[in-house]
């Protein structure tokens, strides 16, 4: 794709990860074994954590690109069009012939909670060569990488350090060398992911942020849903509360948070201010259905 190019590949943030189609249904309750739950009509919309994060940052006025592979099928073209419409640099979104675009099956219950099953498309997974080619061509202030990708592309990115700020998200792939986390400037995870990484049941995000820093990242940020976020860096730690809002759908709220945070950090906004804005962006995201409608100035 060549739509919406930034001059000479210069962007605020480059996002590295997956893009897929979200197949979403509103359900009165999740089905129990052997029973059927009737849902609303199915909607199909572009999604995936990296795509959601990219669009969230672009809608705040950021110059952004997405490094990802999709199939050259109807879903892949739908994803490419959505990114271009949002003003995203799409030159590193590759549509692969004869590959199938992945999909996420999302059930949303009346309390707004989302339950997601991701059907990966192995043929579209990024490779180390993809990372090398893209990072050589992009001048970015920050890179955001999904750590659950296969270890080869993640390792290639972390060792190359193609930007002043490297942000990691999600639980690392089990085969990723955990020593590589020292290359991260920022690690962003939610409470459940933090507990999985630390192999603990402790649900205090402030404590978890301090413990995760011991793995090497310079800054750790933990999102805590309705409780906002907690963070820890070399100067200490803190909490940022979330405003009380009605919850319609939590799908993509964490991605809206991270897209906003990455953009502000790329623009050298102080950490606490960047987290405060990101919390409000995430809070706005839960007030509507779907992953990509909210924005904040």
Image (cartoon, helix red, strand yellow):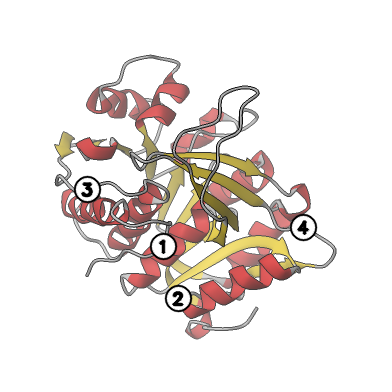
Place of residue 293 in the rendered image (x, y in percent of width and height, measured from the top left): 37, 65
Q: Earlier in the sequence, mark 2 or mark 3?
A: 2
| Above or below 114: residue 166 | below
**Horizontally, is 2 left or right of 97 in the view?**
left
Secondary structure of the residue carrying tag 4 is loop
Q: CA distance from mark 2 to mark 3?
A: 26 Å
Taking depth in this image into account, of 132 and 127 the one nearest to the observer is 127
Circle 3 Cα neighbour tier, 10 Å, few/some/many (<14 / 14–19 / ≥20): few
Place of residue 157 in the rendered image (x, y in percent of width and height, measured from the top left): 58, 51
Place of residue 249 in the rendered image (x, y in percent of width and height, measured from the top left): 37, 48
Q: CA distance from mark 1 to mark 3?
A: 17 Å
Residue matched to label 4: 100
Marks 2/1 in contact by CB < 8 Å: the verdict is yes
Q: Earlier in the sequence, mark 2 or mark 1?
A: 2
Circle 2 Cα neighbour tier, 10 Å, few/some/many (<14 / 14–19 / ≥20): some
Secondary structure of the residue carrying tag 3 is loop
Place of residue 14 in the rendered image (x, y in percent of width and height, measured from the top left): 48, 63
**Horizontally, is 226 left or right of 294 in the view?**
left
* Image quadrant where one finds the C terminus: bottom left
Taking depth in this image into account, of 128 and 278 the one nearest to the observer is 278
Residue matched to label 3: 246
Residue matched to label 1: 292
**Horizontally, is 249 left or right of 284 in the view?**
right
Q: CA distance from mark 2 to mark 1?
A: 10 Å
Residue matched to label 2: 86
Taking depth in this image into account, of 21 and 43 the one nearest to the observer is 43
Res. 94 in view: no
């Amino acid at each position: 794709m060549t739509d919406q190019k930034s001059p000479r590949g210069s962007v605020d943030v480059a996002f590295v990860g997956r893009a897929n189609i979200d197949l979403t249904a509103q359900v009165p309750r999740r089905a129990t074994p052997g029973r059927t739950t009737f849902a609303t009509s199915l909607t199909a919309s572009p999604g995936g954590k990296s795509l959601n994060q990219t669009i969230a940052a672009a809608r705040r006025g950021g110059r952004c690109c997405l490094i990802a592979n999709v199939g050259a099928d109807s879903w892949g073209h739908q994803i490419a069009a959505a990114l271009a419409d949002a003003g995203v640099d799409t030159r590193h979104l590759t549509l692969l012939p004869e590959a199938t675009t992945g999909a996420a099956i999302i059930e949303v219950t009346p309390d707004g909670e989302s339950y997601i099953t991701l059907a990966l498309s192995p043929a579209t997974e990024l490779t180390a060569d993809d990372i090398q080619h893209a990072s050589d061509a992009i001048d970015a202030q920050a890179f955001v990488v999904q750590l659950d990708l296969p270890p080869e592309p993640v390792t290639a990115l972390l060792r190359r350090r193609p930007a002043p700020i490297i942000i990691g998200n999600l639980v690392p792939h089990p085969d990723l060398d955990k020593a590589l986390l020292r290359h991260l400037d920022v690690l962003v995870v939610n409470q459940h992911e933090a507990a999985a990484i630390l192999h603990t049941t402790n649900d205090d995000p402030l404590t978890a942020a301090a413990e995760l820093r011991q793995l090497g990242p310079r800054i750790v940020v933990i999102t805590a849903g309705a409780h906002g976020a907690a963070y820890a860096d070399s100067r200490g730690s803190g909490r940022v509360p979330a405003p009380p809002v009605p919850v319609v759908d939590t799908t993509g709220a964490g991605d809206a948070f991270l897209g906003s945070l990455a953009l502000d950090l790329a623009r050298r906004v102080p950490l606490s201010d960047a987290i405060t804005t990101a919390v409000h962006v995430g809070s706005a995201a839960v007030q509507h259905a779907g992953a990509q409608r909210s924005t904040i100035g």
